[in-house]
Amino acid sequence: MVKKRLVAPGIKQMKILKPLLTFFAAIVLFSGCEQNQVVSETADRIIHNGHVYSFLWGEPDGEGVPASDAPYQNGVWSSDGEAIAIKDGNILFVGANDDVMAFSGAGTELIDAGGGYVYPGFVDAHSHITGLVADEKFIRINGAANEDEAIEIIIAATKDRELAIGEWIIGGGWDEGEWMNILPNEKRLTELFPDNPVLMGGETGFGYWGNKKALEAAGFDRDTEAPVKGTFTRYEDGELSGIALDEAGRVWRRILPAETIDERKDTLVKAMNIMASDGFTMTHDAGTASLSMAAFEALDTEENMPIRIYAMVDRADAKLVDEWTAKGPMSYPSNMLFVRSMKSGLDGTLGVRSARFLEPYSDMPEHSGLDENWTMQIGQMDQMIQAGFQINTHAIGDKANREILEFLEKNYAINPDLRNLRHRSEHASVIHPDDYKRWVELNVIASAQPPYVSEDPPWALSRIGEERAKDMYAWRKMRRLGIPLAFGSDLDSYDHNIFYGIYGAITRADKKGIPVGGFMPHEALTSEEAIRGYTNWAAYSAHVENEVGQLKAGMWADIAVVDKDLLNVGSSNPADLLNGKIIMTIVGGKVIYKN
Ligand SMILES: [Zn+2]
């Protein structure tokens, strides 16, 4: 409807939106009326006095240059609206303050955006939101540089707790990447807690560290063989020394006391409210197992979903995989819950060197990651893709990322329509230079996490070396080739703050600006691309780009109001993004959070 937005900077963009109103008024006047009676729509809610960025203009090109119809002139962005009218959970109108009042009626709630910046609600395309709400007894050892520091935190957290004999001490957050060179053993935890099992998970969930009681509780002893895709550390005499990696860690974790569905519902509501307070209107849950799935379904029935959830069926939950294979993909009528995808995985992480590479690790020759038999995993992936599910596969190393291509090729040969399901590589960290072309041909999305590029390079470089690192988080290269990107945080392993995420994609540096100039700076994105990664591109990766990710009449009213002009600050002074605050979050027309 609006073709050109070539307006000199400084000139208000409101005029441009006039045609939008005219066009839309025509629709509302002549639709939904009885007996040709002319009625106009009255908004439930109107947000006005904002700087609205609708993102309704064309996509930037592969170099990040804004489209010719973008509200962008001489390096400066201008907002393309001031106000939004909302009715029945949908956007009715986006435009000027004066024009929006045509939709105001007796029952209309007016919300003053106070000059704040208004964006499509943010979408976190890769999260593990249960991790946001650890129960009070869960001991967070995040940030501990080593065993000594972790032990101090554990002692402080348990000193006032009256521990019954056999009561679990549970916590997590140790940095598998940083700790990998000097892994602790069970000795000190065993000494401190001879009568209580202690289990501390690693930050990314691939490593577990526990004491003797915790090993005993799982029935692990010197004769226990590690499961396929897993590793136990051992003392020289073969006795288990207290660390389990990958699948072995997951087996260990499973013996923790079971949680009830009410507890899980409570956790999820809290987590969704935290996400809303952080500007997110939808998140993709990267691995939803039975308990969370049942809790989401119950919350959806009770109309108690603060934000929208795109739940990926957890491949490790065989029962759930079978159940959904039989049911097929589903969007719930509320439009708050979507189960159309599966979270699978073809490797581990760079930190613990379980990510799978075609060539050995640079800091561990002869080791190129997990090399076990992945047939069973692929079998579940085959089952789900043939049932019409999008397959979102954890793949960090170039070998795992290549195997996604092989998996898709094989399945497209059976049913060519499966290529339309927008399959994703979750993380898509390192791609072999020979493989990009096939990525494009096979229509694969890179679901990537800006916090990775901010935080991982210092140790990731030693893992894979300079040469391979050129194809690590190679987002500009992907954009040039037309590989779709979707952004997320991988919370709670990483900080999901939206301002930090946008900052990371632009600067490729950590919060202190290190490395100066950014890691592989030629792969940096523009502020527009960074925001699209968290809005309409993330929506595309969940098949909802016609409903969310832009501010447009007819789309769901998912909106974030913030105190930063993200497009301009992101291109002129990205470090200032880190000071950003969320002012308001609206999901389906309802104000879920207000600062
Ligand atoms: Zn993840």
Image (spheres, rainbow, N blue to C red):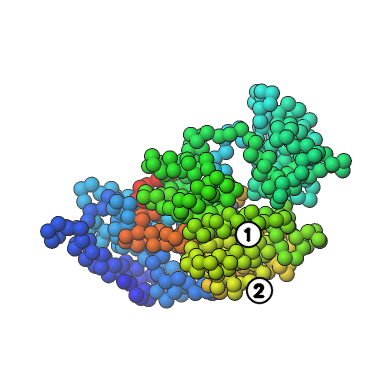
Three-letter amino acid code at the position of disc 1? Ala
User: Which element type, helix, strand or loop, lies under badge 2?
Assistant: helix
Residue 122: image location, x then y, percent: 46, 55
User: Where residue 443 sits: x, y (%)?
Assistant: 53, 69
Q: Position of residue 512 (x, y in %)?
A: 64, 56
Check the image and report above or below for 50 versus 481: above
- Name the image quarter holding residue 346: bottom right
Answer with left or right where residue 293 lies relative to residue 151. Answer: left
What separation in Å lies between label 1 and label 2 (alpha carbons)?
A: 16 Å
Q: What residue is rendered at 71% in x and 63% in y?
A: 357
Q: Which residue type carries mark 2?
A: Asp
Per the image, the residue denoted by label 1 is 395
Residue farthest to the right, as pictured: 237
Q: Which is more toward the observer, 261 or 146?
A: 261
Look at the image and tell me in which quarter the C terminus lies: top left
Residue 437 spot, x, y in % from top left: 59, 74
**Residue at the image position 77 percent from the left and 63 percent from the top:** 360
Can residue 435 be seen?
yes
Q: Residues within 10 Å of mark 1 (few under 14, many from 20)?
A: many
Numbered badge on residue 434:
2
59 and 242: which one is in front?
242
Secondary structure state at the residue bearing disc 1: strand
Q: Quadrant of the N terminus?
A: bottom left
Q: Within 8 Å: ligand 1 and the Cβ of disc 2?
A: no
Q: Residues within 10 Å of mark 2 (few under 14, many from 20)?
A: few
